[in-house]
Amino acid sequence: MKKNKLFWLLGMILALGIFLAACGEGDNADTSVDTKDAEQVLNLVERAEIPSVDSVLADDAVSFNVLNNIAEGLFRLDQDNVAVPAMAESEPEVSEDGITYTFKLRNAKWSDGTPVTAHDFVFAWQRAVDPATGSTYGPYMMTGIIKNATEISRGSMDKSELGVEAKDDKTLVVTLERPVPYFVSLMAFGTFYPQSEAYVTAQGENYAANSDSLLSNGPFILKNWDGTGLTWSMEKNPEYWDAETVKLDTINVDVIKEPGTSVNLYNNGEKDRVALTGEYAMQYADDVEVEQVLKPTVYYLKFNQERNGVKTPLSNVKLRKALAMSFNKQDLVDVVLANGSIPADFLVPTGFAYDENKQDFREVNGDMLPFNAEEAAKLWEEGMKEEGLTKLTLEYISGDTELAKNMDAYLQSQMETNLKGLTLRVKNVPFNVKLDLDAAQNYDIQSTGWAPDFQDPVTFVDLFQSESSQNNMSFFNEKFDALLDQAKGELALDPAARWKALAEAEKIIVEEEAAIANMYQTGSMSLQKPYVHGIVAHPFTGDYSYKWAYISGKE
C-alpha cells in the first residue's frame, strides 16, 4: 500500500485553505518558553453549559470544545490548523483504491495509566453508530463513509460489521464505502475519539455523567463538573503522551451568559479572556487587548415544514423566501452583533474551502436571496393567498443568552414590520432544551448555526440531505439529494465536477427552495490579557486548543 492520488488530494484541501489565525501567539508558540515567572492558571468564560462529554453523544460546540482539550483522536489540528498525527504515530497507509486506511498507534495512555489501544477506537466507533446508543453524530458522520455504517445505523446489521478492525493493540484498519478525500481530516473530529471499553462498561449509565466518571487521553483532565453545573476546570494530564508541550496546570471555566458581567470580571482581573458582542464590541473595538478573527461558522434560520405529522404553512416556498429576504443582515451584524461578523447570503462560508486553482468555493454562487423588503412583501402576500391566510403566527425558538435575545428582538421587529399579518412568538430556551426541540421537530422557526466538522463544503451542504440526522425540518428535494450522492460517490476523485455539484446543491437549498434563511458568518471579538499566549483557534473540531497556551509576563 502507498499514499495515492486520494491522499494527495487531501493534502491539497488542507494546504489551500485559509485557516484561522491563532489567538495571541499560538501559531508560533515556543514550547521551550520559560513559564516560571507566572502561575500557570488560565481563567475563562463559556457561553453555555456542557450538554455532554461523552464523545459518542456530543453534538454541540461547547461539548466539542471541552472534548478537544481533554481527549484526542488519531489526528488533531496543530497550531497551523493542519491535521497531524496524534494517537496515530504517523500518516496512515492508504490502499491504491482509496478504500482501506491502516493506522499505527503510538504508545499513549489513558489518565488512569492504562494503554490506549486500537480496540478502544473499534469500541467507540461501533458504539457511536449503534442505533441503541442514540448518537446523532455517529450515524451522521459515518453513514456512506465507513463500510456498513448505513445499514448498522438503520438497525439492519450488527455493529460488529462496521468497517473498523483492530489487527492488534497498535494497528487499526478502517475500510470505507467509497473514497473520501477528507477522511484524515475527519479523524481529528470528536465523534472519532477512542473510549476504553472496560471503563465505559464498568461505569454503565453513569459514564461521563460528571468529571469523576470519565477518562482522558488528551492534554487535560476534566475536573469539578457535576454534570449540569455552571462551572468546571481542566487540569494538566500527566499521562498525556505529549505532556512536555503542555504548560498550563489549570484552566478554570465559568458559564456567564451576560456580556456585561463577563467584561466586568475581565476588567477586575478575574478572567483572562472574554468574548465581546453588541455594545461591548463597539466600546472595545480599538482596545489594544482585542483579538478578532472571522470564523467559518454560519448562523441561519431553519424553517420547519412539518410539525406533529402535519404540514405547516412553511411548506410554501414563497413564504420561506419572503421570510429569508425580510430582514437587513448588514444592520444585524453592524449594530446588534458588532463583533466582526459579516452578512451571509450563503451557506458555505467565505474563506473556508478552495479548489485546486485556489478559487474560494464562495465565488461560484456568490450571494443568494439578499435583503429585499419589497420583494419579500410581494412573495409573502402571494404565499399567504395560496395558503388561504390573512394572519399567521409562528413559534420562533432561540437561545437564552443576552445576545440571542437582542438578535431575536431585531429579527422579530424586521419580519413583523415587512411581512403583513405575521406574528412571531419568540421562545428563548436553554441550549439543551433547544437541542431537544430540534430533535423532536417541535418548532416553526429555529435560530441555529453550524461550524464545520472538517474542511470541505459538504460539511455544510449535506446537513439538509433528506436522511440527515441534522435535517429535522422535513425538507426534501430529489435533485438536491442526488447531487450530494454524486459528490460523495462517483465524483469523489473528480474535484472539478464534485465542486460544481456541491455548488448546485447549495443553490437549491439557499436560493431555489429557501429551506433555510442565512443570517451571518460569525466573527469573534475577544478581550485577552497580554500575559496569555498560545491559545489556538480552530476552524473545525473544538473552537480552541489550550495545549500550547501559557501564562508569561503577568505582573
Image (spheres, grey):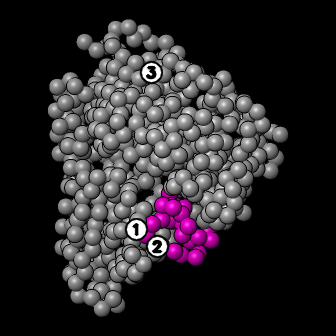
Q: Tag 1, which secondary structure?
A: loop
Name the residue that disc number 3 marks: 236
The image shows residue 449, relative to residue 154, as above or below, that is above
Residue extent of the magenta highlight = 456-483
Can residue 76 be seen by looking at this rendering? no
Give the Cα distance between marks 3 and 1: 40 Å
Question: Quick check: 538 left or right of 499?
Answer: left
As drawn, the label of residue 441 is: 1
Q: Amino acid at mark 2?
A: Ser
Q: Which tag is nearer the camera, tag 2 or tag 1?
A: 1
Earlier in the chain: of badge 3 and badge 2, it is 3
**Residue type, label 3:** Lys
On screen, residue 209 versus residue 445, left or right, reads right
Magenta span includes 354: no
Residue 474: mark: 2
At x 60% / y 53%, what residue is drawn? Answer: 129
Answer with the quarter of the image where residue 257 lies.
top left
Q: Position of residue 172 (x, y in %)?
A: 72, 37
